[in-house]
């Protein structure tokens, strides 16, 4: 067991001869150099926020019955909570220079870390397929709008295979190859790509918003709600909206360590989070609200889908530019949120057999095998599969944070993350920490129940809005109690 309690410094050799090959490869090892600055983290969040999904999520809050100012307050409050938790999960990976599944070896054990890795990786694969499909469906709409001859091959045509139209297969394959190509070029290429994506989408969003406001004669109403909520119903709905924002970002928030590890300092990461989350999201939210509000006088109905908004504009150049921009934005968020995560997660399962690139391609191939176009149309499949898996994100987060800040007091022995020696601090019992596994299981039962029971009984549906908070809170407390017991596996490891 290593005696040095300091973390692996930036610039030191990334690999050591003492590292066990069953736990190590060039991608999982501590970074030799951490080069990302504040802007890179800022751009990462811009790519994560500026997407069709982010726009739709923000726009969907109007359907809850909230007014524009209430939607804005809910969005900003939710993103401040996300920023707080992102700073918490960022530090251990940034300090140690290792990705999310590797830092999970500290609480779960060098073998047990595969539990959170597989859970997070599976969620990412599912959403990778769905996001790719949604982007391809948006392209289908635009292409049919531009070229009438493609209509028989589009979604409403008669040419289809395995539930997807001929045009749909073409656009899905195109986006699949584009995303795989960007990913295959490596992390530095991805960094440059996301550095470009976020600002590019802002330019188009400002142009779209300005065009719609000008077309409407600047006569827009910010009261977009079709309901009149009063009293405590407003408060309860706003809390649900805040929880929705946190849940939307829960996946990237959990494995944010995959990116914070590249930060040259924790302060740079925190500044990037500040600019990319509350500051950036506030501006994005204002644009979203104003753009949605302007669709009502311009098109006669409220439209919260930016692709549909662009397709309604009677200008070919605007349609093409909008379609390319939002497609680029979707590729950006898909790579950072749903491609990189399973790449590290699957590589962690068998580092010598599965490289980072191979892990990413497993995710890409898996996304096609799932046929997300069929799955996405099945509301029950999404609700019970992604809902259940998503409910486990909270417990995993709670366990990781409790372990790093309360149990280990922000101290990680990096070398022991890469040893299978029974004397290693993270060996516990056969490479698994029963305290972390049990805490995750207990918290997972409650968070999953909060999703499934209301769906089955048809009552108390509001509880499912808070599944992440329920899982995170119970996981945090359960692990703290289990790991703090005298004689527990965690205490024995700390004493060793």
Image: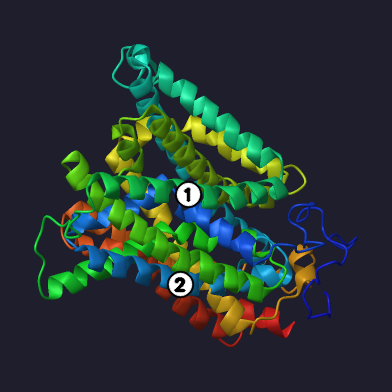
Query: Is residue 435 toward the left or the right of residue 445 in the image?
Result: right
Placement of 125 over or under 409, stated as above or below:
above
Would you call the spot at circle 2 few (<14 residues within 10 Å), some (14-19), or many (20 or more)?
many
Would you call the spot at circle 1 few (<14 residues within 10 Å), some (14-19), or many (20 or more)?
few
How far is mark 1 from mark 2, CA to CA? 42 Å
Placement of 432 over or under 127, stated as above or below:
below
Q: Which numbered disc covers residue 475?
A: 2
Q: Do the residues labelled 1 and 2 touch (CB within 8 Å)?
A: no
Q: Name the residue under label 1.
A: 203
Asked whether residue 238 is in view, the answer is yes
**Percent x, y for residue 42?**
57, 62
**Percent x, y for residue 486?**
59, 88
**Which element type, helix, strand or loop, lies under badge 2?**
helix
**Percent x, y for residue 479?**
51, 76
Query: Is residue 237 toward the left or the right of residue 270 in the image?
Result: left
Q: Which numbered disc covers residue 191?
A: none
Residue at image location 77% in from the left, 75% down from the top = 7
- Foreground residue among 81 and 397: 81
Name the quarter where the N terminus is drawn.
bottom right
- Foreground residue among 210 and 360: 210
**Percent x, y for residue 429?**
66, 68
Disc nearer the start of the sequence (1/2): 1
């Amino acid at each position: 067991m290593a005696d040095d309690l300091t973390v692996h410094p930036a610039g030191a050799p990334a690999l050591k001869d003492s590292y066990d090959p069953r736990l190590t490869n060039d991608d999982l090892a501590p970074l030799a150099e951490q080069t990302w600055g504040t802007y890179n983290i800022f751009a990462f969040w811009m790519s994560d926020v500026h997407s069709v999904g982010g726009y739709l999520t923000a726009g969907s809050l109007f359907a809850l019955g909230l007014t524009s100012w209430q939607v804005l307050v809910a969005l900003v409050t939710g993103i401040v909570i996300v920023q707080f938790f992102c700073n918490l999960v960022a530090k251990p990976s940034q300090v140690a220079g290792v990705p999310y599944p590797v830092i999970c070896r500290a609480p779960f054990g060098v073998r047990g870390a595969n539990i959170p890795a597989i859970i997070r990786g599976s969620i990412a694969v599912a959403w990778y397929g769905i996001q790719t499909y949604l982007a391809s469906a948006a392209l289908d709409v635009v292409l049919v709008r531009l070229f009438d001859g493609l209509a028989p091959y589009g979604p409403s045509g008669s040419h289809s295979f395995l539930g997807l139209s001929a045009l749909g297969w073409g656009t899905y394959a195109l986006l699949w190859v584009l995303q795989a190509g960007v990913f295959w070029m490596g992390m530095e290429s991805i960094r440059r790509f996301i550095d470009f994506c976020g600002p590019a989408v802002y330019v188009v969003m400002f142009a779209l918003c300005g065009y719609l406001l000008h077309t409407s004669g600047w006569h827009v109403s910010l009261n977009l709600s079709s309901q009149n909520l009063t009293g405590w119903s407003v408060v309860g709905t706003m809390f649900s909206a805040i929880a929705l924002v946190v849940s939307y970002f829960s996946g990237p928030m959990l494995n944010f360590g995959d990116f914070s590890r590249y930060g040259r300092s924790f302060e740079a990461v925190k500044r990037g989070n500040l600019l990319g989350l509350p500051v950036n999201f506030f501006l994005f939210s204002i644009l979203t609200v104003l753009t949605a509000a302007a669709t009502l006088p311009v098109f006669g109905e409220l439209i919260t889908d930016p692709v549909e908004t662009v397709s309604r504009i009677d200008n070919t150049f605007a349609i093409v530019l909008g379609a390319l921009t939002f497609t680029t934005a979707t590729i950006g968020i898909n790579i950072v949120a749903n491609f990189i995560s399973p790449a590290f997660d699957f590589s962690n399962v068998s580092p010598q057999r599965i490289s980072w690139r191979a892990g990413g391609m497993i995710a890409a191939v898996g996304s096609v095998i799932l046929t997300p176009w069929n799955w996405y149309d099945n509301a029950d499949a999404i609700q019970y599969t992604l809902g259940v898996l998503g409910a486990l994100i909270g417990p995993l987060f709670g366990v990781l944070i409790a372990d790093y800040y309360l149990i280990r007091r922000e101290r990680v022995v990096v070398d022991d993350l890469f040893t299978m020696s029974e004397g290693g601090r993270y060996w516990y019992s056969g490479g698994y920490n029963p305290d972390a596994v049990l805490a995750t299981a207990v918290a997972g039962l409650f968070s999953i129940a909060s999703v499934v029971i209301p769906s089955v009984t048809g009552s108390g549906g509001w509880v499912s809005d808070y599944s992440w908070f329920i899982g995170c809170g119970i996981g945090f407390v359960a692990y703290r109690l289990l790991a703090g017991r005298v004689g527990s596996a965690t205490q024995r490891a700390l004493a060793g």
